[in-house]
Amino acid sequence: MTKSDPGTSQPGTDAPSTDQPGVDEAVRAELNRLRESIDNIDAAVVHMLAERFKCTQQVGVLKAEHQLPPADPARESRQIIRLRELAASARLDPAFAEKLLNFIIAEVIRHHETIAGETRDSTG
């Protein structure tokens, strides 16, 4: 759902944007209930990603301090296999889960490279 989608509600508001004439009140109420749950889940996902990145930042510092490479392809492969299995058991498309993890891994590696560069600059 996007802002241009006429059926979306604005975050932080109780008013649905399904105010088209003829929309049944029960449908409107159910949409609101579901959208509130989606908003809560989105918030939880953002907070969980923030916590994950706090941990990976610490990993990046540790790797930089010990001159370890930013990427760990063997771990990444294991994590992809693990996440695909978790996705399948949760009835989530494993290919989607893999794409999401690959995106996250790429961002983590980028952070680790930045940290490594900053560590080299401050010691050299």
Image: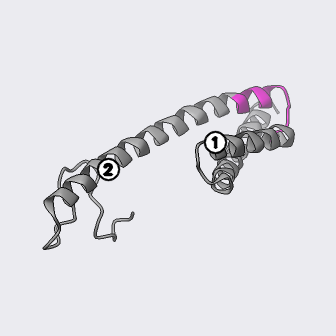
* Residue occupied by mark 1: 89
- Residue drawn at x 75%, y 45% is 80
Q: Which residue was labeled with disc 2?
A: 34
Which image quadrant: the N terminus?
Answer: bottom left
Q: Is residue 113 visible?
A: no
Q: Is residue 91 magenta?
A: no
Query: Which residue is drawn at the image coordinates 54% and 39% (left, top)?
Result: 49
Amino acid type, label 2: Leu
Q: Residue at (27%, 58%) from the top-left corner?
A: 9
Q: Along the line of sight, which residue is nearer the eye, 81 or 51?
A: 81
Residue 25 location in percent, x, y? 14, 59
Picture quarter containing residue 43? top left
**Separation of marks 2 and 1 at Cα, in angstroms:** 23 Å
Instruction: Report the coloring of the rendering.
Output: one colour
Magenta-colored span? 59-71
In the displayed structure, would residue 27 be above or below residue 105? below
Q: Position of residue 124 (x, y in %)?
A: 82, 33
Percent x, y of residue 83:
69, 42
**What residue sits 63% from the left and 29% below the top?**
55
Q: Secondary structure at mark 1?
A: helix
Between residue 21 and residue 16, name the one nearer to us: 21
Q: Earlier in the sequence, mark 2 or mark 1?
A: 2
